[in-house]
Amino acid sequence: MSVIESRAALNEVVRRVVGEAQVVDMHTHLYPPSFGTPLGGSGDRVDPEGLMLWGIDELVTYHYLIAEVFRVVTPDRLGYETFWKMSRSEQADHIWKHLFVDRVPMSEACRGVLTVLQKLGLDPNERSLAGYRSWFGAQDPDAYIDLVMERSGVSKITMTNNVFDDNERERWLADGALGDDPRFDAVLRFDAVLDDWSTASRCLDAWGYPVSGEADEESVSGVRRFLSDWVKRIKPVYAAVSLTPEWRYGAGGLAHTMLDEAVLPVCREFGLPFAMMIGVRRQVNPALRAAGDAVGMADVSSIERLCAAHPENKFMVTLLSRENQHELCVAARKFGNLLPFGCWWFLNNPSIIQEMTLERLELLGGSFVPQHSDARILDQLLYKWSHSRAVIGDCLAEVLGRVLDAGWRVTEAEVRAEAERLLAGNYRGVIGG
């Protein structure tokens, strides 16, 4: 068991070990080929409504870049509806020209596309997307998943399975083996139950789960039966919702009752952690569609009250506002059933990842999950984990360097154990994997 003698040696070991460690990506919006794919590649299995998204056109038209291109080609020059009437490839060509050809692609979302191409052995300096389209078109979707996972160092991909999405729900109902791909874990997502009861109640009634418009016994029973049936169907590793900044726990009302009397009892019954992603202000600019959401501050005291009221439940929480992060760390020090995770969405920038990761290491030691990819396009795993690993490695090296300076003898085995916990083990410990 060799002891690391200097900061320079420690830095080298930490960065190497973090780079080698296999990641369990605990939150994505990715799917295997069984869910269909709009890009058939070499297999020619094209499903225009398929959920497995990959390839250069999907990568370049990701909603981060759609928002960015409207800052360059403003709506008075190209109207929103004109853009949305373009084909996917026309949109991609437009974005490539204005964000990658006419100017240096400096933003994190733009740099991510460059990293993806580089990791695939492609030259990111092409002026046209034609060559990239040919390359992706020659790939088999199933084999491409293996390639991306191998090059990004991801051993398991965790899906987000929204049972209120008609496209996805019908696929699950039609094929009992839909989620059997061992590379992917399922997650039961049901925002509407807590955030949009008018939609949830209408759907549940139509699907054979009678509920009323009130927080009564009939509604609680219907929701519990609905969630239990879907847990049995898709075998999720956790349950999840995304909530707006206005969410409060302890304020009473229907959402409070459904959480306390339906959602959390089902989670306890099946041993499922409950994940909450809080802070999205939906559709501040509806003309941007999926790119139109913004950020707001969550109420951390509600999370504290929830954890205190349900010590037998496990909670995994990520908050969208930078201003919430210190308070969430302090809350996690008070509640062992609370796991902070990831640098979500607008926080997924190196400067903020560094700030959040150092803050968490200083307050929580290694008892959190520093990152999830939140990838919606398969290829994004290549850049999100490459960029995040670099920052996580630097932060871990800095904190372990302080330990070294304080006289603690650090070994490579200890570094490896800490890296494994951060990138896989802490999450596995919560889901029981």
Image (spheres, rainbow, N blue to C red):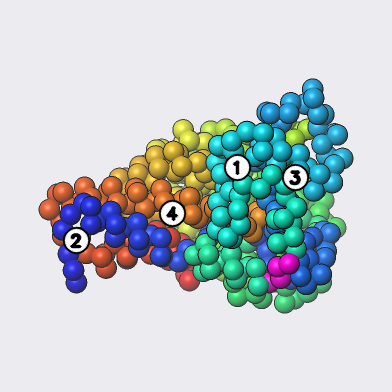
Q: Is residue 396 above or below residue 349?
A: below
Tell me residue 47's x, y (percent): 83, 64
Q: Which residues are magenta?
A: 138-142
**Circle 2 residue:** 4
Please tell me the numbered disc located at residue 389: 4
Task: Name the side, left or right, on which 366 lies relative to 258.
Answer: left
Residue kind at label 2, given as amino acid type: Ile
Residue 48 percent across, percent down from the top left: 84, 59
Residue topped by disc 1: 110
- Read off the residue under disc 3: 92
- The first of marks 2 and 3 along the sequence is 2
Inter-mark Cα distance, 2 to 3: 49 Å
User: Contact, CB < 8 Å: mark 1 with mark 2?
Assistant: no
In the drawing, does residue 325 fall left or right of residue 290?
A: left
Separation of residues labelled 1 and 4 (CA atoms): 18 Å
Query: CB atoms at circles 1 and 3 under 8 Å apart?
Result: no
Q: Badge 1 local density, few (<14 within 10 Å), some, or many (20+)?
A: some
Residue found 76% across the figure and 70% down from its top: 42
Q: Amino acid at mark 3?
A: Ala
Horizontal side of residue 9 vs 208, given as left or right: left
Of the two numbered discs 3 and 4 on the same chain, state the one appearing first in sequence: 3
Q: Alpha carbon of mark 4 to alpha carbon of mark 2: how far? A: 21 Å
Q: Main secondary structure of the magenta part?
A: loop
